Amino acid sequence: MENWKQRVTDAFWFALAVLFLIETWLWDHFRDWLHDLGRALGLEGYEQQFKDFVATLTPLKTLAIFITPAFAIVPAKLVGFELIAHGHVFTGLFAILLAKTLALGVMSFLFDICRDKLMQIDRFRQIYSLVLAIRAWAARLVAPFKQRLRQTADAICGRIEALIGVEAGSLTRRLARMRELARQKRSA
């Protein structure tokens, strides 16, 4: 019985770590995507104007701007819950996830602009340090699983290559190159 409880507990923490890492991945990538979108739409000037505006604010007013997207999605979440309550589970979940993802992206974009002012708030710095520690913990917890997943993928690619007669290892080399490019982009 005790072993069962430990497995459930381990599975819970693992799932929580994976969800946290997914959210941090979205945070990192949405920030970049929004910057790219702003450049594509020619909005760099507005971004600089907003940065200049934030520079005139107090840290607490900057915090208010930063957390606004978290509160702005409440109506969308309520709509999602209403849809779920009326039997439209997938549509409701989609509405909630879409709202959360968009808010997360906007908050990551705002964080880049507001970071210096936000770091002037002692409590915010403490929370930020805690979030970074949780991110490191989640990455350590999930790392062995990711390694096994890579090994399994490599083994499957090897079997596919052997089965279809692909030039010795070309598929594996292409996948390895793609992974390396992804790692380089993440570290940049």
Image (cartoon, rainbow, N blue to C red):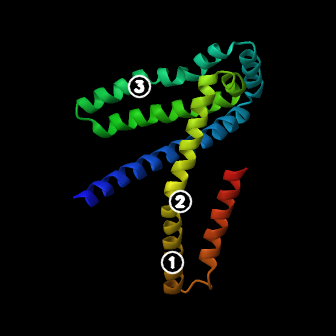
Q: Is residue 187 left or right of residue 30?
A: right
Q: Residue at x 51, y 77 (%)?
A: 155
Question: How busy is the neighbourhood of tag 3: few (under 14 within 10 Å), some, or many (20 plus)?
Answer: some
> Which numbered disc, 3 or 2, marks the residue that appears first in the sequence?
3
Q: Residue at x 61, y 19 (%)?
A: 63
> Which numbered disc, 3 or 1, marks the residue that appears first in the sequence?
3
Secondary structure beneath label 1: helix
**Which residue type does callout 3 highlight?**
Ala
Whole-Å distance between the Cαs marked 1 and 2?
A: 18 Å
Of circles 1 and 2, the one toward us is 2
Q: Is residue 111 above or below residue 161?
A: above
- Kindly tell me whether residue 106 is visible in this rendering: no
Q: Residue at x 69, y 38 (%)?
A: 36
Secondary structure beneath label 3: helix
Q: Position of residue 104 (x, y in %)?
A: 54, 33
For disc 3, the marked residue is 76
Of circles 3 and 1, the one toward us is 1
Q: Are the two marked residues, 3 and 1, in contact with CB atoms closer than 8 angstroms?
A: no
> Which numbered disc, 1 or 2, marks the residue that appears first in the sequence?
2
